[in-house]
Image (cartoon, grey):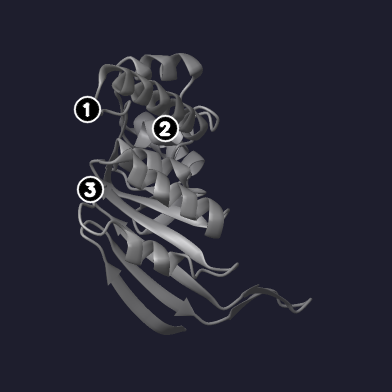
Amino acid sequence: MIATKKELSSEQHTLYSEVIAERKKLIDKEKKLFEVTPKHTRYRIYIGRFFELKKGLHSVFNELKSAKENDVLEFMIDSGGGFVNEGMQFYNIMQEKFYGRTVAYLDNKGYSMGAMLFSMADKRVIYPYSDFMYHNYAGGAVGKGGEIKARLEHTSKKLEAFFHDIIVKQGFLSEDEYAQMLVGQDYWMGAKELCKRGIATHVIVEGKEVTAKEYLKELKKKKKKNK
């Protein structure tokens, strides 16, 4: 049962929150065992472009800062990317308030920072035609020569370490692939590749949510059947 609903919008994203009452599910009738889902708030945020130019995401993050230990965060991602720093703010709130309780849905596309955000979630759900792309960041600096050099060196070191933690440590790209990404290689992927690499953990197909392994097995069966 859903008790209350709230909506909060920024320039590029929309946050919905629902307070969900405690639920009990019978898992063993003979032993009278129940699976209990405690009362919690489900935060669901629709992600567009990472390009907040006015107030930033103050209202959205202020709302998420009120999350309690059982609350969950869902991302609905349809994003071509944008500011890395804005994406890192989402990473910070996930680490602080929703550690181990995040779900991301690749609802159409996730490129650049959109791909990074999808990769940060604990559970990562795609659809058969979800589209995905990793690449290195783009940027620039203005100022005196020494200042520009120092800033670029500092920023590169920080962001390359951040990207490495999200992409390579989880095994989504190899060290060699990551090195190629840093010098300009783009990695475009569809549903099959996302499942093979473990970037996607689940797929929604024909009204059901199946694991990535189950989806790949079904693709193999269909391929054999069509031969």
Closer to the chain start, of discs 1 and 2, is: 1
Residue 119 shows in the view: yes
Q: Residue at x 51, y 68 (%)?
A: 67
**Closer to us: 121 or 105:** 121
| 11 left or right of 172 in image | left
Neighbour tally class for label 1: few under 14, some 14-19, many 20 plus, Cα within 10 Å: few
Report which residue position mark 3 lands on. Answer: 51
C-alpha distance separating marks 1 and 2: 52 Å
C-alpha distance separating marks 3 and 2: 40 Å
> In which image quadrant can residue 82 be found?
top left
Residue 43 shows in the view: no
- Residue flagged by tag 3: what amino acid is it? Phe
- Proximity of marks 3 and 2: CB atoms separated by less than 8 Å: no
**On residue 142, which mark appears?**
1
Query: For the residues carrying marks 1 and 2, which lies nearer the camera in this image?
Result: 1
Neighbour tally class for label 3: few under 14, some 14-19, many 20 plus, Cα within 10 Å: some
For numbered disc 3, what is the local secondary structure?
loop
Report which residue position mark 2 lands on. Answer: 220
